[in-house]
Amino acid sequence: MEFTLHQHSHSVGIAALNGIVDVMSCHTLRQQIKQILQQGITSLVLDLQAVKMIDNSALGTLKECLQMFRDRGGELALVHVTHQVDMKIRLLRLEAVFPIYTDVNVALKRL
């Protein structure tokens, strides 16, 4: 898994996940999100278009991270969700939990 952050504004970040996001990368993902929050970013748009596979534990970690952002008055929005990731989200009934958008600009307007 690769994680790349681009700060959009003082409190909003845009990040991209790339590769396989699974139980082996959950700790790293959680640490990356904690670092973002420590930088003062309270909302994040997370681009998933380059995610080849995501497992249940990784989605659980993203749900934890979503709560971390919400605890600070922010949000974690998912964009460019691939078919495979979308199917996994729906299988776990998380589509009502995560704000999901087709485009980064739309997500930024909603944050």
Image: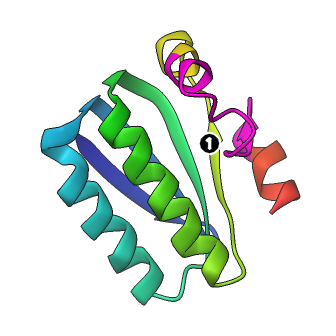
The question of residue 47 being in magenta is answered with no
Rendered image quadrant of residue 21: top left
Drawn side of residue 106 relative to residue 69, left or right: right
Drawn side of residue 89 relative to residue 70, left or right: left
The quarter of the picture where the N terminus appears is: top left
| Res 10 seen here | no
Q: Residue at x 62, y 21 (%)?
A: 90
| Res 20 seen here | yes
Residue 8 x %, y %: 62, 67
Rendered image quadrant of residue 98: top right
- 11 and 34: which is toward the camera: 34
* Amino acid under disc 1: Leu
Give the structural element (helix, strand or loop) at label 1.
strand
Q: Residue at x 42, y 75 (%)?
A: 36
Residue sitting farthest toward the left:
24
Q: Residue at x 80, y 63 (%)?
A: 111
Residue 82 x %, y %: 54, 18
- 29 and 40: which is toward the camera: 29
Drawn side of residue 18 relative to residue 88, left or right: left
**How did the renderer colour the structure?**
rainbow
Badge 1, how many Cα within 10 Å: few under 14, some, many 20+?
Answer: many
Residue 45 x %, y %: 61, 53
The residues colored magenta run 88-104
Image height check: is 54 above or below 63? above
The residue indicated by pointer 1 is 78
Drawn side of residue 4 relative to residue 15, left or right: left
Image height check: is 22 above or below 33? above
